[in-house]
């Protein structure tokens, strides 16, 4: 009855009405307020404790004194600094801004940075934005220097607070969570009224989305109104210029994803690599030539930041080969070669890949400075609080935090944090999960559905983009040009895109029953509306691939890899969750292993990633990477080349089980004529060409008319390679050998001849 009532009053399809209720909006009135965010519904700024005293002090020093706005160098701190400083100056205050640098001043309000700012500006009032809640000594120093103080912040408070007027929603139980710019926005509302404050809704929305605060309540209103302003183009020129240089098409709506992946990284880039002054100037200057120059510089620094971040991630992944991923539920790494400005982003990627809270440290002034990122359900701030005896200082949120540790305390910090996590969180938190919001049929994917879904925007923390599930058997994925991306047309108006999933193309296209998870977004091109569904993962329900694929993978296992790079791995054994991989080549063994180890994950062809979950894998793809496993067991009397490659490439314990279960697969549709046909295609269209992998060869031949399914091609390609008809040289060129070869020498053909006829 409730769902029907909400659907009727809001115009939502029943499935979306259920989703709204599941997110806590369980009356028609709440649902309507959620779907139509209204700035008049914002909480009173005076609901934040300390606002009245802060207004009094600011008005006092605006009339007779000098105000210093002390910010921070991330997108939130920059936005908060811009909002408050512009507002103060436009109302006649003598206001200066100091944004610390990462390398010289460090994070937040430090004594060194405070003295620098005081010596330069001689303020009478210090107002912090996005920092200060843990700065007891620094606020004391400010008083000694003759300043009165106002601390505006949103980070977790310590047991003892600074001796100052404080505005921080986390110091009270009856206030909604805000970002630093959100607190500054509320203060401007109290100082100068709602109508004036709405001039800053664009900046506040960018900071709110970028800082990953929950997009509920006031934050949802701020984000929705700000995105509406950004979409209209009636915003400050700096944000328009940054959107344009980031590739956003003028006239198209600006969504939360555009802020998260286009605006925020570029605004953050200067604070990470040089000085956040550039981003602050972009938000506060009206000179178009200056803004265009700054936007180009931020875009360049963002590209540099991406390169540094990718290098940091690659190095962290290499270091993890020597890390105990079996017994540690937290990743803690230290490298003096890393750039401090990118370790937070890198930590987020490592945490996502390895399903563990991650802390990456660099050394600054003989102290280890770390950036933490967590995973769903694990509160990293509480983890740091539990290990505070080994920490100099720390601060942050549930999902992200920063800390300082003395080098000699790093090992103790790791041990305490790991022990706390193990005692507090079960292993389910660290296993892959298949969370979704609703199940859809392909017929549900209409433009009307996508239009109604947009009413739930903006998406972000606290209101994530809905993930949908659809059960499929055979799909029709195709490769996107020469990329590792694939796509499948679902119906006349919707397409499913899977980025970097080329290795799973055959599984997705196979007749195995699987649940596919994806998000839905509406796109418009030349007046035509379509749905772009983005693949988020799959859960295989019938975890046995077709016979042709099993045979193809077994055939590929007969071919030694051309070049092997030894992967050194610290032996860490395995426990009930991590460290052990069981590889099967036949369905009978696969089924027996699943019965024996029901808690192990299962995979077909491709592993679920590099995280060494205890896994049972059937029909292993040759491009799998097993470097993080300590124990690899192979069943079904595996080909000698496969075993020798494993032993040569990995330092894990390799165990071979020479069992021979009964397996009579369906006949592989491959005979001498088809092999000759494949060879003719290769000779005509692939000979003496450079290829990155076997998928590129297949793609090239398919464009020229080769029509066999990939497993048939892969098997034939393996046979031709096995008998020496074709080979890949040291420069990755496909070469063809002259002269006849004897097919009777092929062990793969013998395997095929054992199939049913």
Image (cartoon, rainbow, N blue to C red):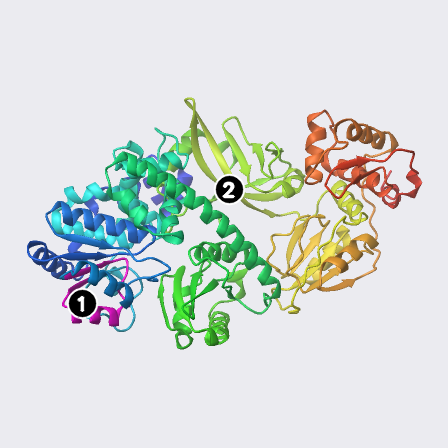
Residue 596, horizontal then vertical, whole percent = 70, 63
Residue 32, horizontal then vertical, whole percent = 28, 41
Determine crowd level at label 2: few under 14, some 14-19, many 20+ residues with C-alpha closer than 10 A. many
| SS assignment at label 1 | loop
Residue 452, horizontal then vertical, whole percent = 37, 34
- Quadrant assignment for the C terminus: top right
Q: Which residue is mark 2?
A: 518
Q: In the image, is 58 to the left or to the right of 682?
A: left
Q: Nearer the viewer, residue 153 or 513?
A: 153
| Residue 691 drawn above or below residue 357 | above
Q: In the image, is 668 to the left or to the right of 322?
A: right
| Residue 565 drawn above or below residue 741 | below
Q: Which residue is mark 1?
A: 164
Q: Which residues are magenta?
A: 125-150
Res. 694 image quadrant:
top right
Q: In the image, is 492 to the left or to the right of 620?
A: left
The answer to whether residue 110 of the structure is visible from this angle is: no
Q: Is residue 577 magenta?
A: no
Q: Nearer the viewer, residue 24 or 86?
A: 86
User: Residue at coordinates 31% horizontally, 64% vertically from top-left?
Assistant: 156
Q: Is residue 135 magenta?
A: yes
| Residue 315 drawn above or below residue 671 | below
Mark 2 and 1 residues: CB-CB less than 8 Å, in contact?
A: no
Separation of marks 2 and 1 at Cα, in angstroms? 48 Å
Determine crowd level at label 1: few under 14, some 14-19, many 20+ residues with C-alpha closer than 10 A. some
Ranked by sequence position, the earlier of labels 2 and 1 is 1
Residue 421, horizontal then vertical, whole percent = 48, 69
Q: How many marks?
A: 2
Res. 49 image quadrant:
bottom left
The answer to whether residue 510 of the structure is visible from this angle is: yes
């Amino acid at each position: 009855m409730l769902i029907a009532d909400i659907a009727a009053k809001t115009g939502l399809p029943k499935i979306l009405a259920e989703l709204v209720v599941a997110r806590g909006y369980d009356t028609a009135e709440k649902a309507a307020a959620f779907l139509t965010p209204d700035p008049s519904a914002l909480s009173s700024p005076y609901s934040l404790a300390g606002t009245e005293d802060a207004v009094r002090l600011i008005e006092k020093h605006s009339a007779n004194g000098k105000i210093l706005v002390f910010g921070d160098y991330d997108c939130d701190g920059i936005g908060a600094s811009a909002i408050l400083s512009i507002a103060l100056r436009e109302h006649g205050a003598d206001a200066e801004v100091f944004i610390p640098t990462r390398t010289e001043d460090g994070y937040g309000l430090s004594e060194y940075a405070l003295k620098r700012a005081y010596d330069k500006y001689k303020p009478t009032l210090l107002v912090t934005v996005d920092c200060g809640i843990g700065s007891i000594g620094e606020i004391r120093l400010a008083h000694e220097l003759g300043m009165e103080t106002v601390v505006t912040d949103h980070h977790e408070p310590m047991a003892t607070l600074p001796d100052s007027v404080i505005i921080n929603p986390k110091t009270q139980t009856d206030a909604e969570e805000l970002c630093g710019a959100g607190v500054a926005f509320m203060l401007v509302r109290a100082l100068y009224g709602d109508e004036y404050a709405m001039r800053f809704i664009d900046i506040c929305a960018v900071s709110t989305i970028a800082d990953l605060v929950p997009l509920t309540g006031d934050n949802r209103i701020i984000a929705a109104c700000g995105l509406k302003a950004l979409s209209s183009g009636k915003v400050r020129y700096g944000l328009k210029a940054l959107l344009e240089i980031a590739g956003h098409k003028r006239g198209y709506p600006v969504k939360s994803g555009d802020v998260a992946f286009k605006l925020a990284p570029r605004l953050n880039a200067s604070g990470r690599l040089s000085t956040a002054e550039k981003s602050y100037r972009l938000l506060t200057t009206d000179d178009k030539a200056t803004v265009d120059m700054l936007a180009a510089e931020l875009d360049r620094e963002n590209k540099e930041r991406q390169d540094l971040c990718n290098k940091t991630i690659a190095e962290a992944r290499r270091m993890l080969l020597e890390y105990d991923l079996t017994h540690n539920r937290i990743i803690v790494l230290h490298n003096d070669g890393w750039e401090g400005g990118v370790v937070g982003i890198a930590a987020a990627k490592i945490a996502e890949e390895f399903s563990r809270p991650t802390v990456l440290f660099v050394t600054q002034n003989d102290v280890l400075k770390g950036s933490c990122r967590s995973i769903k359900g694990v509160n990293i701030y509480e983890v740091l609080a539990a290990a505070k005896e080994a920490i100099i200082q720390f601060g942050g949120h549930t999902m992200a935090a920063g800390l300082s540790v003395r080098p000699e305390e790093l090992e103790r910090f790791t041990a305490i944090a790991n022990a706390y996590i193990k005692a507090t969180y079960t292993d389910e938190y660290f296993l892959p999960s298949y969370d979704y919001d609703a199940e859809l049929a392909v017929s549900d994917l209409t433009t009307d559905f996508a239009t109604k879904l947009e009413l739930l925007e903006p998406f972000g923390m606290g209101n994530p983009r809905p993930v949908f599930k659809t059960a499929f058997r055979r799909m029709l994925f195709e490769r996107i040009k020469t990329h590792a991306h694939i796509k499948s047309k679902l119906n006349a108006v919707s397409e499913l895109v899977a980025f970097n999933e080329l290795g799973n193309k055959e599984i997705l296209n196979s007749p195995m029953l699987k649940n596919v998870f994806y998000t839905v977004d509406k796109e418009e091109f030349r007046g035509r509306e379509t749905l772009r569904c983005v693949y988020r993962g799959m859960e295989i329900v019938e975890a046995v691939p077709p016979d042709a694929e099993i045979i193809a993978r077994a055939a590929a296992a007969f071919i030694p890899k051309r070049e092997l790079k030894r992967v050194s791995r610290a032996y860490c054994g395995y426990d009930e969750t991590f460290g052990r991989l069981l590889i099967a080549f036949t369905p009978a063994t696969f089924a027996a292993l699943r019965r024996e180890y029901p808690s192990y994950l299962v995979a077909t062809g491709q592993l679920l990633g590099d995280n060494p979950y205890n896994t049972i894998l059937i029909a292993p793809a040759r491009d799998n990477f097993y470097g993080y496993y300590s124990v690899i067991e192979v069943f079904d009397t595996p080909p000698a080349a496969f075993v020798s490659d494993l032993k040569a490439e990995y330092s894990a314990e390799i165990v071979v089980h020479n069992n021979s279960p009964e397996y009579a697969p369906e006949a592989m549709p491959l005979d001498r004529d088809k092999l000759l046909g494949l060879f003719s295609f290769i000779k005509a269209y692939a000979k003496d060409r450079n290829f990155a992998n076997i998928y590129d060869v297949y793609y090239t031949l398919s464009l020229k008319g080769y029509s066999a399914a990939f497993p048939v091609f892969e098997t034939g390609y393996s046979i031709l390679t096995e008998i020496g008809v074709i080979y890949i040289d040291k420069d990755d060129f496909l070469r063809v050998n002259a002269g006849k070869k004897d097919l009777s020498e092929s062990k793969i053909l013998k395997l095929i001849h054992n199939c049913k006829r």
